[in-house]
Image (tube, helix red, strand yellow):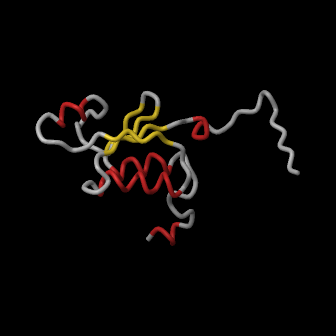
Amino acid sequence: MILLLISPTAKLPEASLTMYQLHIANKNYSSWSLRPWVLMTALDIPFTEQLTPFSAGAVQNAFKAFSPTAKVPCLVDDNQVVWDSLAIIEYLAERHRGVWPEASTART
């Protein structure tokens, strides 16, 4: 049995308290949407998937409701909105270990 004691005044890292919302389109047609989804799933980063499928017509208006660029993927973290799959991955790398290798030689 393992007993973990946490002081009532101890602060947990901010990232562990965050529940991200990841807005994506159809995973079958949008590899850009799939990239942050795969990363967050593989690293067990908690998130809520918000699926807004591509459709004919006014899909851009639907995307504007959550994305300033009206594009997916889009990550919402409280009041912070990050779009573009690489920008989302960089944002997550600043908050979670394991997104990029720690050794710089492994990243070249």
Front residue (pair 23, 13): 23
Identify the residue at image location x=30%, y=54%: 32
Front residue (pair 50, 75): 50
Q: Position of residue 62 (x, y in %)?
A: 23, 32
Q: How many marks?
A: 0
**In which quadrant of the rendered view does residue 56 lie?**
top left
Task: Say above or below: 32 vs 53.
Answer: below
Identify the residue at image location x=25%, y=35%: 63
The residue at the far left in this view is 57
Identify the residue at image location x=50%, y=60%: 100
Q: Is residue 45 left or right of residue 82?
A: right
Q: Position of residue 83 (x, y in %)?
A: 32, 42
Q: Position of residue 53 (x, y in %)?
A: 26, 43
Quarter of the image with the C terminus in it = bottom left
Q: Is residue 13 left or right of residue 30?
A: right
Task: Say above or below: 100 vs 76.
Answer: below
Front residue (pair 64, 90): 64
Task: Say above or below: 49 vs 42.
Answer: above
Q: Position of residue 18 (x, y in %)?
A: 55, 36
Identify the residue at image location x=49%, y=51%: 93
**In which quadrant of the rendered view does residue 35 lie?**
bottom left
